Amino acid sequence: MQTKPFRIGTRGSPLALAQAHETRDRLISAHGLPPETFEIVVLSTMGDRITDRSLSQIGGKGLFTQELEDMLLSEGLDFAVHSSKDMPTKLPDGLFLSAYLPREDARDAFIGRTAAKLMDLPQGATIGSSSLRRQALIKRLRPDINVITFRGLVDTRLRKLAEGQVDATLLAFAGLKRLGKDDVPTEILDPEIFPPAPAQGAICIESRIGDDRINGLLEAINDPRTHEAVTCERAFLSTLDGSCRTPIAGYAVSDGDTIRFSGMILTPDGSQHFRVTTEGKAVDAEQLGAKAGDDIRLDAGPDFFSSWT
């Protein structure tokens, strides 16, 4: 019998808290447990504290996870809730991604101040974005656009936009929806033209390998379709690089026994790109993603990747 609350680790941003509460509510519903069975534990990560530089300059994705993972490994937490796209492809020994909630909309949202659509922005307009993928995709479509680093919480970025610091910004549509701000975007970008980051829109749960009690608890809220799709995308990412230092897009859809995947790599200035599409059995999601990464690397050739260093 559970005598003390299960401790759910999360970052303290409004979006991270919304994701932790969604996880808790799904567990309460799945197991018929009272709310006091769970305690949400908020930790500050280095990625939260350093907001004046892009992630590529300060160390990449692990900056949003290390403090939570340290607490998991010391058993100060029972599990942690993350945005899947923030997760490094290599996790600390002893930890794994044990469950995924049903995926939200994976597309990017364009929020324009001087134009409602990306392609309608005036010549030489300025967009705020810290994502190298978004920067490269913007430059691919609009080489005239000036892109500046734009980090911070969702409300901070929207405030900077409203103040006129930039003409537009881009955010994950999933995050806006989870915050009740789905009326904010002025354009939802077509993933065929503006493909999302691997694992975008998916909430994942990290726990300890071998902790059968916790992993059994989490299994009840795992969404198999999301699990397969994100596993495929993360394998693609891992084969290529897996940090925040490179422009990589990837999106998989698991449908019945089949999984379809599309991936893209770009030079940081958007002047060159390569795309791969494939499909196969959903049970082979990880191998499919890894092979797509190998194939696109072969297509691009070694010279392409010199721009990533």
Image (cartoon, rainbow, N blue to C red):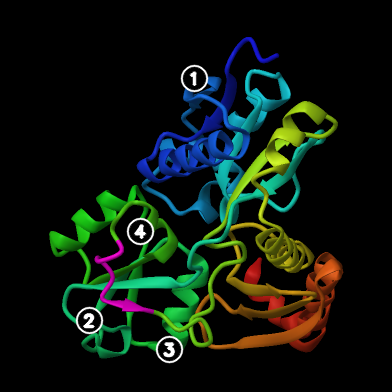
Q: Are marks 3 and 4 in contact (CB under 8 Å)?
A: no
Q: Are marks 4 and 2 in contact (CB under 8 Å)?
A: no
Q: Amino acid at mark 4?
A: Leu
Q: Residue at x 47, y 86 (%)?
A: 140
* Image vertical order of residue 135 relative to residue 40, above or below: below
Q: Which mark is residue 61?
A: none
Of tags 3 and 4, the one toward the viewer is: 4
Q: Position of residue 244 (x, y in %)?
A: 58, 58
19, 304: nearer the viewer:
19
Residue 66 occupies which quadrant of the picture?
A: top right
Of tags 4 and 1, the one toward the viewer is: 1
Separation (CA) of disc 3 from disc 4 = 24 Å
Q: Which residue is mark 3?
A: 141
Q: Which mark is residue 176?
A: 4
- The residues colored magenta run 182-188
Which sits earlier in the primary sequence, circle 3 or circle 4?
Answer: 3
Q: Main secondary structure of the magenta part?
A: loop
* Image vertical order of residue 47 relative to residue 251, above or below: above
Separation (CA) of disc 4 from disc 2 = 17 Å
Which sits earlier in the primary sequence, circle 4 or circle 2?
Answer: 2
Q: Using residue 204 as the reference point, say whether residue 118 is left or right of it.
A: left
Which sits earlier in the primary sequence, circle 1 or circle 2?
Answer: 1
Circle 4 residues within 10 Å: few <14, some 14–19, many ≥20: some
Of tags 2 and 3, the one toward the viewer is: 2
Separation (CA) of disc 4 from disc 1 = 28 Å
Q: Secondary structure at mark 3?
A: helix
Q: Secondary structure at mark 2?
A: loop
Q: Is residue 187 magenta?
A: yes
Which sits earlier in the primary sequence, circle 1 or circle 3?
Answer: 1
Q: Which residue is mark 2?
A: 116
